[in-house]
């Protein structure tokens, strides 16, 4: 339905910045186990596998519910759905303090994961306030709320050391509840919902919202996001372990490096959105995937010693990526992942303007599952292959597949739209032969 509601710049700014702040708080809650889980591990005597599952469980829930939350946002409006998600996440985080067994903590973590579903709600809500030519920038700003994970890593340890992990859960819970109330009273219903209510039109049915999901293009977008977001989350979780194991760094140094990777990789998403508006999301995705192929290839090379039979005897040398080059390459990889995250979501309101909730929810779900699946797979590869760089080998295969699929899909679309341009050639002998026949 055509939007007949007048939107002011003030309303746009309010919707964008309120949503971005709310998503930042939600992301901080979503990753709370990365800090309090360390103390819970000590209290319960958990092994590394049990600890990893506990930390990853909220990521699983937050990913799986994104599809449904996106559809409900299209049906009932982002203002109410976002508020309810935050209130539910706040209640779950507060009740976390009542758990005292491992199974109890796992169930609590499942509930806390609700906060992670806020991404699909915010994408659908924010996109309604902006025209197509500005949606990339707006969604890039909103997506920078990923920095909430860094907020938890920086502030939660201080609270936990001073007052215990229960205080962290309670403070984060109260903060999320206050944010929910403020968000509800500060924001307004999106213009599409307001127009629909004035006209007395019923919301689009669940079946209609799900219809675009049969398109292979949607799943291709999901693969892109599995890499640019899922692998970003996975590396943010995995880097401390990788740096301590592969380079022998202490945990404090490794943690600082991981935080330095997470913060800019979140903020540069804004740049990705702006670039997608200016030069096109397709070109940004080509940059992202191409540079990522190069980076993951370089990072995949394991430290290798060689012995060459020289004239005067054996010559020994080693090829390896040192810690400083590793950091540079990883930061470059994170930067382009950040651009790609924004570019993926620039595509969705353009191709599926009436199904942003469903399509954005599915793509977000697939990306979030990457953050759950990949760290576990990294550990399995370490056990099976016994090479630290095996995680980057997997990422190289993943991003190469995405790049090849994207290139041939785009070429197929170009052929369908401009068949003559692909039949022409600049080889005169071929053109002459065609003229003769």
Image: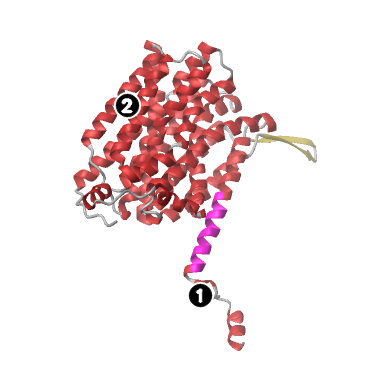
| Magenta stretch: includes residue 96 | no
Name the quarter where the C terminus is drawn. bottom right
Mark 2 Cα-neighbour bin, 10 Å: few <14, some 14–19, many ≥20: many
Q: Quadrant of residue 133?
A: bottom left
Instruction: Examine the structure image and report whether residue 408 is included in the region drawn in magenta.
Output: yes
Work out which quarter of the rendered image holds the N terminus and state it.
bottom left
Residue at image coords 41%, 53%: 281
User: Residue at 54% across / 25% down in the picture?
Assistant: 53
Instruction: Judge by depth and name the residue closer to the eye, 86 or 157.
Output: 86
Q: Residue 277's spot in the image, x, y percent? A: 35, 53
Is residue 392 left or right of 420 when viewed as pictured? Answer: right
Name the residue rendered at 42%, 26% in the picture: 112
Quadrant assignment, res 304? top right
Q: Mark 1 packing: few (<14 Cα in 10 Å), some, or many (20+)? A: few
Q: Give the range drawn in magenta.
A: 402-416
Q: What's the CA distance linking mark 1 and mark 2? A: 57 Å
Identify the residue position indicated by label 2 in the image.
176
**Nearer to us: label 1 or label 2:** 2
Mark positioned earlier in the residue sequence (1 or 2): 2
Q: Is mark 2 on a helix, strand or loop?
A: helix
Disc 1 vs disc 2: Cβ atoms closer than 8 Å? Answer: no
Q: Name the residue under label 1.
A: 420
In this rendering, would 415 be left or right of 115? right
- Of 182 and 202, nearer the camera is 202
Image spot of residue 123 (x, y percent): 36, 43
Q: Main secondary structure of the magenta part?
A: helix
Residue at (52% x, 33% y) in the render: 372
Say if residue 244 shows up in the picture: yes
């Amino acid at each position: 339905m055509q939007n007949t509601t007048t939107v002011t710049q003030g309303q746009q700014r309010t919707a964008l910045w309120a949503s971005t702040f709310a998503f930042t708080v939600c992301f901080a809650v979503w990753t709370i186990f990365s800090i309090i889980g360390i103390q819970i591990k000590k209290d319960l005597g958990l092994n590394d596998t049990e600890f990893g599952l506990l930390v990853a469980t909220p990521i699983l829930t937050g990913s799986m519910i994104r599809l449904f939350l996106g559809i409900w946002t299209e049906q009932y409006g982002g203002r109410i759905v976002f508020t309810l998600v935050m209130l539910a996440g706040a209640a779950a985080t507060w009740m976390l303090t009542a758990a005292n067994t491992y199974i109890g903590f796992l169930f609590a973590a499942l509930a806390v994961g609700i906060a992670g579903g806020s991404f699909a709600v915010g994408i659908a809500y924010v996109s309604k306030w902006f025209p197509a030519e500005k949606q990339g920038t707006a969604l890039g700003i909103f997506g920078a709320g990923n920095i909430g994970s860094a907020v938890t890593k920086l502030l939660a340890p201080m609270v936990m050391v001073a007052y215990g992990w229960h205080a962290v859960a309670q403070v984060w819970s109260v903060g999320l509840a206050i944010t929910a109330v403020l968000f509800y009273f500060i924001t307004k219903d999106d213009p599409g919902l307001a127009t629909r209510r004035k006209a007395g039109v019923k919301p689009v049915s669940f079946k209609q919202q799900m219809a675009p999901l049969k398109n292979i293009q949607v799943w291709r977008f999901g693969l892109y996001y599995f890499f640019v977001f899922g692998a970003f989350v996975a590396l943010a979780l995995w880097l401390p372990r990788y740096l301590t194991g592969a380079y022998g760094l202490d945990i404090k140094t490794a943690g600082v490096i991981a935080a330095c990777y997470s913060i800019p990789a979140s903020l540069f998403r804004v740049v990705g959105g702006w670039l997608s508006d200016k030069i096109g999301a397709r070109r940004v995705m080509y940059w992202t995937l191409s540079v990522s192929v190069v980076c993951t290839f370089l990072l995949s090379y394991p430290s290798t010693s060689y012995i060459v039979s020289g004239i005067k005897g054996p010559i020994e040398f080693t090829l390896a990526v040192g810690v400083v080059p590793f950091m540079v390459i990883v930061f470059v990889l994170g930067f382009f992942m950040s651009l790609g995250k924004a570019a993926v979501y620039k595509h969705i309101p353009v191709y599926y303007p009436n199904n942003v909730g469903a399509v954005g929810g599915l793509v977000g779900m697939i990306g979030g599952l990457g953050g759950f699946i990949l760290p576990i797979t990294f550990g399995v590869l370490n056990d099976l292959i016994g090479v630290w760089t095996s995680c980057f080998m997997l990422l190289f295969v993943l991003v190469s597949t995405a790049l090849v699929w994207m290139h041939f899909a785009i070429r197929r679309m170009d052929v369908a739209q401009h068949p003559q341009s692909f039949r022409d050639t600049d080889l005169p002998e071929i053109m002459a032969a065609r003229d003769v026949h």
